[in-house]
Amino acid sequence: MLVDDFPVDLKPFLIPEVSGELGYDCLSCGARHAPDQLLYTCPACGGLLMLTDKKIARLQEKPGSFWRRLFDHRLMLNLQALKGVFTFHEFLAPNIPLSDIIYLGEGHSPVVKAPSSLANQVGANFFVKMEGQNPSASFKDRGMAAALSMLNYLVRIKNLDQVIAVCASTGDTSAAAALYASSLGQSLKSVVLLPKGKVTPQQLSQPLGAGATVFELPGVFDDSMKVVERLSEKYHVALLNSKNPWRVVGQESYAYEVAQQFDYALLDKVLIVPVGNAGNITAILSGLLKFHKAMVIDGLPKIVAVQSQRANPVFRFFRQPLGSRTYCPVVVKPSVAQAAMIGDPVSFPRLDVLSKQYEQEAGLSSFFVVEVDETAIMEGMLQANRHGLTVCTQGGECLAGLKAALGQGLITPSETAILDSTAHALKFVDFQNAYFEGRLAQEYGVTTKAELANKPRPLILENTPIPEPGQTLTGAQKEAFVEAATQAIAQALTLVEKV
Ligand code: F0G
């Protein structure tokens, strides 16, 4: 839609100017640092940083109805920079000029209502936000769009050359980082560190395809993460893990979209989110709090964070009584929710701060963490995929979390849950195959159900011509093959011939 065709009162605001006063706030010592530099830890004390906007109050000067109308109308505006997560520019990273924004088709992933056949099995109606429909097939593209747009802006204003962007990954951050970096061409080189054998072949193929330099390291994600942290402390490299606060602001867009997709009525909703490095849950809490402060939403939804029993430091922290909680990293065990298999989440300090703020605003029964076992995660994924929803193992973890939360009475069937299927099922298809072939028991402790397994059936045709590789049948031979194959399939399906 052309700008001229928008309502007159919205026209001046459709294309946002640079605004706000962003800065890095240290969570440990409280120091504030200017935003136009690559910072991942506080130069004063080494603490974790969060981006805040000193002029955030300007967003509250307008009524919530203004923002709702503006964001809804903006969806019709054909301007690439505002097509993705930057639809919410004013709340996200308003210091980045539109000309530096990178858009590769991320954001605005569909929210799909679970079919009633699945809702009946689970015992509640629910929706799934299909984050696998992002360009690199996971939610990480949201954070990368923001982090790489910021980097693009910095490269321009500071005349930087040959920037090396590094990240450690369980597979999806690296796919997204490599993809967005590749869109910037020569000015940026993407380097990714992966725990060998702990990312799926599909995930590994992504940074390779995008031309990144890929290192495979011994150990698990937590080990690779430590190396990336050291690299960013000792050398001039840009860090693209969620330790980078620009990643987190980009991922806030998930919360803004859920609000928009439910007409800004979140009071009776429950957001179910898988937790690994704790970047996503942090971003979602932060985004919801910002929208709530500006009265864009009617209230704050309940949050249920989910972890596997085999990688559960966040669950272990929050199950302790309020006031006497201590955080301890865990040594992870193999989990089918492999992308979230993290024992020492880097964003934990942010989650600690934000969950407290959230509970202050929304009440004590607004934030829960549940843990689920591997069998429940696999069954969640397979069950969803059998009902039209292409969820990954972490999406399966969310479905398992929904069932656990219902079972524990943390939520009721009358509440509407929105599950975050953080990636596409195809990235994790090897877990499905291993389940079907009965190979998940020993390493992952998954008990398989025969009725959930599936395998291809070879068609054995005897005494019939068969198309050999590189050849095609013709005439009577082709006819004989088609008839024999048709009959064999009809017999297997017990089809009755038309009369
Ligand atoms: N789901 C998927 C598909 C993921 O890739 C991740 C994290 C998570 C959930 C957990 O989200 O870390 O924000 O709490 N993957 C990171 C990576 C760590 O390297 O791709 P989180």
Image: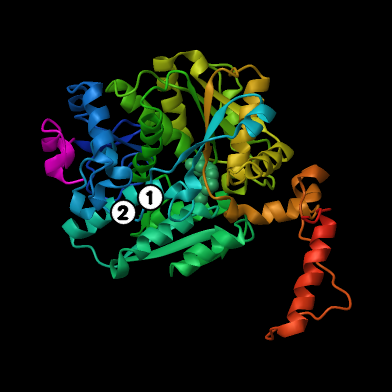
- The location of residue 95, given as percent across then percent down, is 20, 43
> On screen, 269 above or below 491?
above
Seen from the viewer's position, the closer of residues 395 and 358 is 395
Local SS, label 1: loop
Q: CA distance from mark 1 to mark 2?
A: 7 Å
Q: Quadrant of the C terminus?
A: bottom right
Residue 469 colored magenta?
A: no
Seen from the viewer's position, the closer of residues 68 and 409 is 68
| Residues at marks 1 and 2 touching, judged by CB atoms closer than 8 Å | yes
Judge: label 2 CB < 8 Å from ligand 1: no
Circle 2: residue type: Tyr
Seen from the viewer's position, the closer of residues 449 and 179 is 449
Q: Which residue is mark 1?
A: 106
**Magenta-colored span:** 1-20
Rendering colour mode: rainbow
Indicate which disc residue 32 carries.
Answer: none
Residue 287 appears in which quarter of the rendering?
top left
At 76% across and 60% down in the image, what residue appears?
456
At 31% across and 30% down in the image, what residue appears?
30
